[in-house]
Amino acid sequence: MTPPDAVVFDMGGVLLDWNPRHLYRKLFDDTADMEHFLATVCTEDWNVRQDAGRSLRAATEDLTARHPEHADRIEAYYDRWLEMIPGPVDGMTEIVEALASRDVPLHVLSNCARETMPMARRRFRIFDPFDVFVVSGEERVMKPDRRVYEILIDRVGRPAGRMVFIDDRPENVAGAAAAGFVALLFRDAERLRDDLAALGLLDR
């Protein structure tokens, strides 16, 4: 069996330290008020609808109409989206650079809105060596649906078994494994380096 010779990364929580709290700590004086807002207004379920293909404008207008008292903070969610990302996850720039130096093909498969991926790519140099980007908001299908892994396989033109897939969500890792990828659960850069070294893609 041919060993894996390409790597596919998730974006938020793996390559980039994305968390809405990085922004909303600037907009709330009280942490409890911030957490209540994120649990009841700009919720994870609301954000996921954009990851599935709804436009940022439609999402913002709909939520602002339902919560006009929070209009400014709702609009900030995507207007100031880049402030949710202070930078790459610790140690990940070095891993990406090490893989690129070995000419390992690098790709992204991310559950994110179609409008946000271009912002991230313009802002962060960590994406410079990457080739194929499959974004759920563009495809209107999300991990762990098998169809999105098949889209990636088709775009890359490489069998799933020759690609390592890395994600911080167990359900997405399980979906990738079911689609035939060598699937790794991301915990931190140090353990990922060990995992990639064990596969012969990096030195220990």
Image: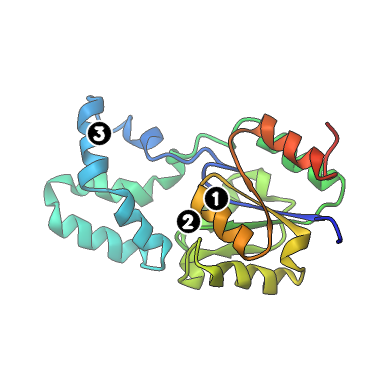
Q: Which of pointers 1 and 3 indicates the residue nearer the eye?
A: 3
Instruction: Give the secondary structure at mark 1.
Output: helix
Q: Amino acid at mark 3?
A: Met
Q: Is residue 191 left or right of residue 40?
A: right
Say which residue label 2 marks: 116
Coordinates of residue 69 in the picture (x, y in percent): 12, 46
| Residues at discs 1 and 2 in contact (Cβ within 8 Å) | yes
Coordinates of residue 43 in the picture (x, y in percent): 28, 48
**Residue visible at 72% across and 65% down in the picture:** 160
What colour scheme governs how the chains and residues are painted in the rendered image of this protein? rainbow
Of 109 and 146, which appears nearest the observer?
146
Q: Is residue 97 left or right of residue 76?
A: right
**Residue visible at 26% across and 34% down in the picture:** 35
User: From mark 1 to mark 2, how far is it between C-alphas?
Assistant: 6 Å
Say which residue label 1 marks: 120
Q: Amino acid at mark 1?
A: Ala
**Residue visible at 30% across and 56% down in the picture:** 46
**Residue visible at 74% across and 35% down in the picture:** 193
Instruction: Give the secondary structure at mark 2.
Output: helix
The dot on residue 75 is none
Q: Is residue 171 left or right of residue 184?
A: left
